[in-house]
Image (cartoon, rainbow, N blue to C red):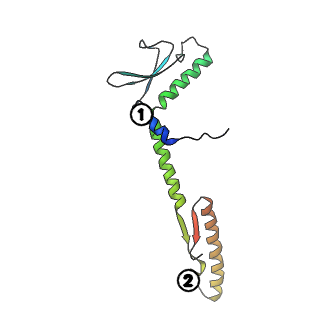
Amino acid sequence: MARMKIDYQALREKAEKATCGVWSLEYGESRFDGDDALIHREVAGYIPICRIEGAHPESGFDEDFQMEQQANAEFIAAANPATVLALLDELEAKDKRIADMEAREVVLPRAHDVHPLGPQSAKIFCEFHRSIVNRCADEIRKVGVKVSIKGN
């Protein structure tokens, strides 16, 4: 199944225009048909948001349909605009952090920038150091951070 492309800005705009605040879920109150579920907001009065037909446990609808409608009602109430906006804010912060991390570059010293210990030791040390630097650079690159070796 192909991954769905989400227009985050359009979703944010829709969430900002929708009824704000905490949404509640009721089943079969006197305010509406007893077979339905009603998603609403209580604020200086009662603001109905949507009605889900057949979601009440005693609606008389087929049990599979009723359970699915009940799950739909619970999801819609939970996925209210405040929740969607919070998720979008978290996603935006994570995207920014990833971009910041990917933009970083680590510069490792060249082997000959390290003080030699003597003619023979210096050659062995430089080869060892070069090997370690290259291995470290490879591991850092694997996680998506740019790496360059000073002077290269």
For label 1, count other residues whose C-alpha is less than 10 Å away and answer few (under 14), some (14-19) or many (20+): few
Picture coordinates of residue 118, whole percent (x, y): 61, 88
What amino acid is found at the position of numbered circle 2 in the picture? His
Q: Residue 58: which quarter of the image? A: top right
Q: Identify the residue at image location x=45%, y=38%.
A: 13
Q: Identify the residue at image location x=57%, y=11%.
A: 60
Picture coordinates of residue 142, whole percent (x, y): 63, 60
Q: Residue 17's mark?
A: 1
Quadrant of the image containing the C terminus:
bottom right
- Circle 1 SS class: helix
| Alpha-carbon span between mark 1 and mark 2 | 64 Å
**In the depicted structure, whether residue 10 falls above or below residue 137:** above
Picture coordinates of residue 92, whole percent (x, y): 48, 47
What amino acid is found at the position of numbered circle 1 in the picture? Lys
- Circle 2 SS class: loop
Viewer-proximal residue among 112 and 49: 49
Viewer-proximal residue among 127 and 43: 43
For label 2, count other residues whose C-alpha is less than 10 Å away and answer few (under 14), some (14-19) or many (20+): few
Q: Residue 115's mark?
A: 2
**In the depicted structure, whether residue 29 falls above or below residue 74:** above
Q: Residue 109: which quarter of the image? A: bottom right
Picture coordinates of residue 130, whole percent (x, y): 63, 75
**In the depicted structure, whether residue 105 falls above or below residue 113:** above
